[in-house]
Image (cartoon, grey):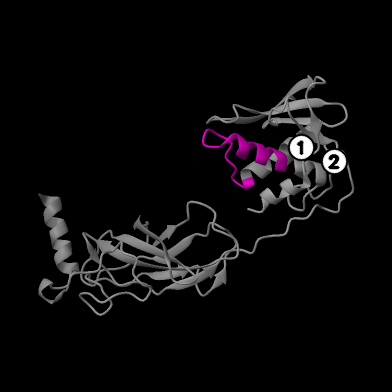
Amino acid sequence: MYTRTLTATLLAALTFAGGCAQAPQSPVSPSPADGATSANPDGSTLKVSAPTIVSPRGGVQVDSRRPVLTFTNSTGRFANAAFQYRLEAFDGGGTLLESRVLAQGAGDQTTWTPDGDLPFGTVYAWRVRAELEGRVGPWSTTENFRTPVQPVVTPTGGAPRSIGINEAFDIMVRIHNDLRFDLGARSTRDERNAFWVAAVAVLHYGHPRFNPRGPDTDWCIKDAGGGRPISDDVIVRCQSRDYWDLIGGVGANGYEWRIVYDGRLPGGQNVYPPPRSALNLLNR
């Protein structure tokens, strides 16, 4: 009873008089970015300030394909509450792409990060407003930003060298961690193979970010012969055919990186260099 009374009291302080209000626009409808007319000219039915977008804004190019969107929280004109916030995101042409409800962050700001990587070189617009018990506050301004330009990956010009298994292991783990690859139960065999070929290609051809010191063309991938697919956890010396298993439980949750030397491959299994084109997978 106390909670219901408190909520009703807050709404009474924050809500515009019902006799003056028209039915508010559905908060989940794909409205245009300039807002719609409802109880107030700005469409709001709560007596709260509009959130202020902190970043990204002003058409800035962000550094990450998962930028952190930050805005200041709304404040009530006569009372305060823990609001929810509706964040809307649009493409460069004004088409609604996302309408998401967020819990209010601690302090005076709330943040949200996209669940996945956004496309390279793309313009987005976004805005946000407070909501409470079906009532809505005024929208913030609509701000724009652009995602990073896709980098051009070219092999390093470093001199050929010998890369030991420990350094090879460290390079591959860094690629996995920095680019957030998932080789667990949610991944497919094709996805794991694509990662593995790209990671070995970094060793074989060099890479300006992950292997700038220079390539070692004696690192290869292998298949088991008979038309079977490549291994998604084994790295091989091209000449000697010595091979190491580097992941335990690949394709399952809880997989782990380790170094296990398994000897030399029998003649029925094929060993070959990864294709140079595999490096394109690292443009993430």
* Residue found at x 78% / y 26%: 243
* Residue found at x 65% / y 61%: 150
- Which of 23 and 255 lies nearest the eye of the viewer? 23
27 to the left or right of 283: left
Q: State the residue position of label 1.
A: 168
- Expressed as whole percent of the image width and height from the top left, the position of residue 227 reads 71, 28
The answer to whether residue 110 of the structure is visible from this angle is: yes
Image marks 1 and 2: residues in contact by CB distance under 8 Å:
yes
Indicate yes or no whether the magenta region holds residue 201.
no
| Element under disc 1 | helix
Q: Amino acid at mark 2?
A: Asp
* Residue found at x 28% / y 60%: 83
Q: First in sequence: mark 1 or mark 2?
A: 1
How far apart are the alpha carbons under marks 1 and 2?
10 Å
Q: State the residue position of label 2.
A: 216
Indicate yes or no whether the magenta region holds residue 179.
yes
Residue 22 badge:
none
The answer to whether residue 108 of the structure is visible from this angle is: no
- Expressed as whole percent of the image width and height from the top left, the position of residue 282 reads 68, 50
Residue range in magenta is 178-198
- Expressed as whole percent of the image width and height from the top left, the position of residue 271 reads 80, 30
| Element under disc 2 | loop
